[in-house]
Every structure is written in structure tokens, then in C-alpha cells.
Image (spheres, rainbow, N blue to C red):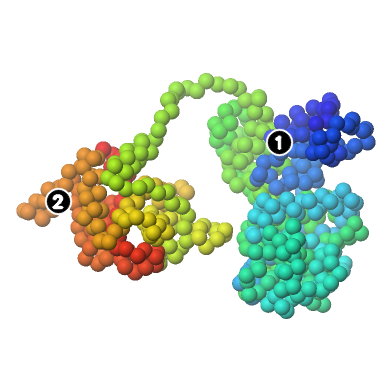
Amino acid sequence: MCCICAADEEFDELCFEFGIELDDVTTEKEVMRKEKHVEEEASADEEVIYKIDVPANRYDLLCLEGLAMALRVFLLKDPIPTFRVADVAKSSLQKMVVKPETSQIRPHIVCAVLRGVTFDEARYNSFIDLQDKLHQNLCRRRTLVAIGTHDLDTLEGPFTYEALSPADIKFVPLKQTKEFNGVELMEFYKSDMKLKKFLHIIESSPVYPVIYDSKRRVLSLPPIINGAHSAISLKTKNVFIECTATDLTKAKIVLNTMVTMFSQYSSPRFEVEPVEVVTADARSTLYPDLSLRTFEVDMAYVNRTIGTSLSAKEVAKLLNKMQLQTEMQSESKIRVSAPPTRSDVLHACDIAEDVAIAYGYNNIARTVPQSHTQGKQQPLNHFTDLIRAEVAMAGFTEVVTWILCSHEENFKMVNRKDDGNTAVIVGNPRSADFEVVRSSLLPGMLKTMGSNKDAPRPLKLFEVSDIVRLDSKKDVGATNSRHLAAVYSNLNSGFEVIHGLVDRLFEVVGIRPAEFDKATGKYSEDGYYITPSQEPEYFSGRQANIIYRGSCIGSFGIVNPEVMQRFDITDPCSAVEMNVEPFLQL
């Protein structure tokens, strides 16, 4: 590490006050000397490199331009920048037309133009580096969003976003001189250390996404490579930016980040030219959207969250330092406007965090908690451990399955229908194996059983864990429930084994079988009993519901042969799944 001078110490302190961390002060030559274990004095002309850790949600701090802008506003050296969408006549707008075939692979695209950009080597490198950093984190290695930047003066609109057969796409890729078609391109880049890790995103698709200008010149083959014809350089003045995506919200954030960071080099400054995107269903939208997002925040919430007693005027001044334009509505309420650079601001708690940063964590008075508590295990978790021990002593082996599963496993494979009001659906799942949050433990148990069909029989498995179901009464829209599931497989179905396990569980928690009153034809409410059921995952006539205090808390039975076949289970098996949370009241 280089010797830290007074200026570096001052910068280190500034970073701490702003909520980021100066990790190291070094040079490229110093790094090389460390790698080669060479002891050599540093020369005065070595360029100093500052390594700074920034929060994962602050995409505006991923480049020098955004970091410098944020720090200068924080120090009140610059006003909060006002980003504008240029007022361009409709006839002069650049247009991107989306073809219907793109829905098969990457359905969304957003675009913008930076006019009058002045690049030098440092700005150009920073521009490319920001794209790489966004690709790695927010874009999830280009699976969600892929960024393409082009020299607009080498192109002619309107542009079209299409999806064609790989053999029908022909162009010269970036940094190459030979023309490739889509198939040849995939083979060529399999040996490229940087690009080969992105090939899998579209390689198996029957169509590849491609962007053309009006003269059928290829801009890019997202998310792999841009075309050589429109490559940007230090001489580029007008930059056309396109972001293709599977997630439209992420695409908007990426586009906003790119244009806001580098619009300070455009002319007029902080002004971005919009692009009209016409979707496959003929809907027209202008991008980028640089409008402010407004939040109404109670001062009581801010002070309670941080532990301060600041006035609305003081909070407004602090938030302005964090690039959040703030107006006093009253002494008890403020209106906060988040700019397009601050996509991380989603809730009043994010605003309270920025107040705390600007105020200074070290300036918050230390207080002794008014109540003293002693940490201990949650009652539900303690009870769960006791249940695990009892089921294990009954001869069952515990397994732990994924809380995410495929939609087919959660419903179709166990003969259940999706009514749209049961399972929590995962947006933009990484693979088809993780599409929903499980609403039952049974599919995971049966999948485990099918994967262990070569294990010695009898095979007795169980799991006590959470399932998640939609619940409109909860503020998050869903609720967790602790369930027990057990599966028994042998040469016979073992229905009596599962029934015995159910009776044993009620016995150890101190619940007796309910007494049947012949006069009223009803069971007593202080016990449990079973009644015939018609659950689709079990064999008809060989299943039962478990009733406790008038409510059905689970069911058990011989697994339906159709379900067993789907999970590749060869021997007969029986299963039980029940909610154990009602027992906690005891």
C-alpha cells in the first residue's frame, strides 16, 4: 500500500461520512510488485488508484462520474443536477420498432441518445467500465439486461429489434474483420475467455435477438456482441444506447444509470434525447423516463427510526446533500423527490437511512435501551426441534428440501390445480426449477424419495419446515406456516405406519382422540379425529383429513400411483402433511 498522505486521510474521512469506504490507495505498478514479490521503491510519477467499496444498491456510484457528482453535492459544492429529456419533434425522433418474434427470447428493449458527447481516453474507459459493472451485478451477467452502445452517426434509423434464425443473421462483430452468421459466431466465441460465459443465454434458442438499422446493418446481437460497423470511439459525438431485457423494470434502471452518469458530457449538459419504442402490439413509449419519484414521509417515523429529534427543516437540508430534493409540507411531514439516479430509494426507510448518513452515525446520541431483554430461541423453533426429535425416534430420517420449486412440481405433478391464489410466483426465475415458493412440503419429499429409489427399504423420510402461501391480510401479501411432512415407502404402502406416526405425534403433544357424541353426531372439540378426504395427491378411498378443534390441519394417505409415476417412485408409498403451528397454543 502507498503511504497515505494528509489529502488521502481527508478523502478517507469524507468517504466514511458519505457511507462508503476507502479500501486501499495504491498504483498499478505497486500491485504488480506485490504479485511478483519484488521490493522496489515507488516512483513519484506512478498514477494513484483509489479502491472504494460502495453499497450494492448504489448503481450511480459504480463510475467516477457518479461518485464525483454525489460527493460534490454532499459537500454542497454543486447543486443537485436536473436531468432533462430533450424536447424533440415527433418527426425527428429516433424510432425502435419491436417485432413479435422477440417475445420468444428477450421481449423488451429501451433506448436513448446522448448528443454532443465529448470523449477523452479516461471518459471513454469509464463509459465502457460502467457497462461491464452493470452487466455483472444489476444485469445478472446479461441474463436480465444487456447494454449496447453505438456511434449514431454511422447508422440510420428507424431501427428494428427482431428475432431471427441464427443462420439468417450475418454481420462483422466488434473487433473483427470477418463476417459471421449466428451459428458460426457461437462456435467462434466458445474459445473467448470473456464472452463464452454469455453464450448459454441464447445458444439453445431457435431464434437469436438482433437489432438492425434502416439499411439492415446490424447494431448488435444481444446479449453477446455489438457489430463492428457502429463501434464507438474517442471521435464519437452522438451515442445511441439500447438495452434489451427479460425484465423491463431492470432495463429502465440500467438505461437511466447510463444516461444520467454520462449526460454531463453531452451538449446541452444533463439533457438526453428520447427514443420512441413501438412494441409488437403497436404501443408507443418514449424512453428514458427521467421523472422524479415522490414520497410523503412523516418526521416522526424518521426520528423514531434513527433515534434523533431533528426538525423538518434540518432533515430537508440533510436530504438535499444526498441528492434527494426535499420540501417541507409542515413541521410533521416532508415531500421527498428521488431523481433517476437513485433507483435504490423505494420506501421511507431508505429516506431515513440517507438522513442518518448525512447527519452522521457518530453524531447520533448513544442511549441505553429502555427495556432489557434476554435472547432465546423462538417458541415455534423450539417446538419444531422437539417434533424433529420425536419423528426421528420413530425411525424416520430427516431431509431438507428447497423452498423454491418448479410450478409443475408444486401443482401438476401432485394432481393439484393452480387457482392463482395459493402460490407465491417468483419473478424472472433463474431456471424452471425455481419458479414458485412451495405451498406444500409434499412435492419436495416425493422428489427426494424418487431420487433415492436405490436406497434400502423401507425408506422413511420426514421434514419439518416452512411453506408459503398468498395471504391478502398480511402486509407482505403472503404468510409462512410450519408444516410436517413424512413419507414411507416399502414393498407395501405402509398406510398403517403413517397413521401410527400421526397418532404418536398427537400423543407426545398431549392431545387425546376426540370423543364421539352419538346423540349429537359430533366429536368433542378438545381432541383430534380423522375423516375421509378426497385429496387428488392420494389414492381414492385410502386417505383421511386430520381434524383438530374443528379445523383441518392436514391429511395423509397412500400416494396416488399417477403422482408416484411422475416422481419416478417405483415402490408403493404413503405420506402425511400437517400444520404443526396449532399445537403451539398448548
Image: 139 above or below 13: below
Nearest the viewer among 99 and 198 is: 198
Q: In this view, does 228 lie to the left or right of 582?
A: right
The amino acid on which the numbered mark 1 sits, given as a three-letter code, is Ile
Image: 113 above or below 379: below
Examine the rendering and report whether any part of residue 80 can be seen: no
| Quarter of the picture holding the C terminus | top left
The residue at the point 87 percent across, 67 percent down is 153
The amino acid on which the numbered mark 2 sits, given as a three-letter code, is Tyr
Q: What element carries label 2?
A: strand
Query: Residue 364 lies in what quarter of the image?
Result: top right
Residue picked out by circle 2: 523
* Cα–Cα span, label 1 and label 2: 64 Å
Nearest the viewer among 535 and 452 is: 452
The residue at the point 21 percent across, 65 percent down is 541
Residue 20's label in the rendered image is 1
Point out residue 287 in the picture as x, y percentages from the top left corner.
Answer: 72, 62
Q: Residue furthest left?
A: 519
| Quarter of the picture holding the N terminus | top right
Q: Is mark 1 on a helix, strand or loop?
A: loop
Examine the rendering and report whether any part of residue 54 can be seen: yes
Q: In this view, does 278 lie to the left or right of 349?
A: right
Point out residue 184 in the picture as x, y percentages from the top left corner.
Answer: 74, 73
Nearest the viewer among 19 and 456 is: 456
* Structural crowding at the residue carrying mark 1, measured as other residues with C-alpha within 10 Å and reported as few (<14), some (14–19) or many (≥20): some
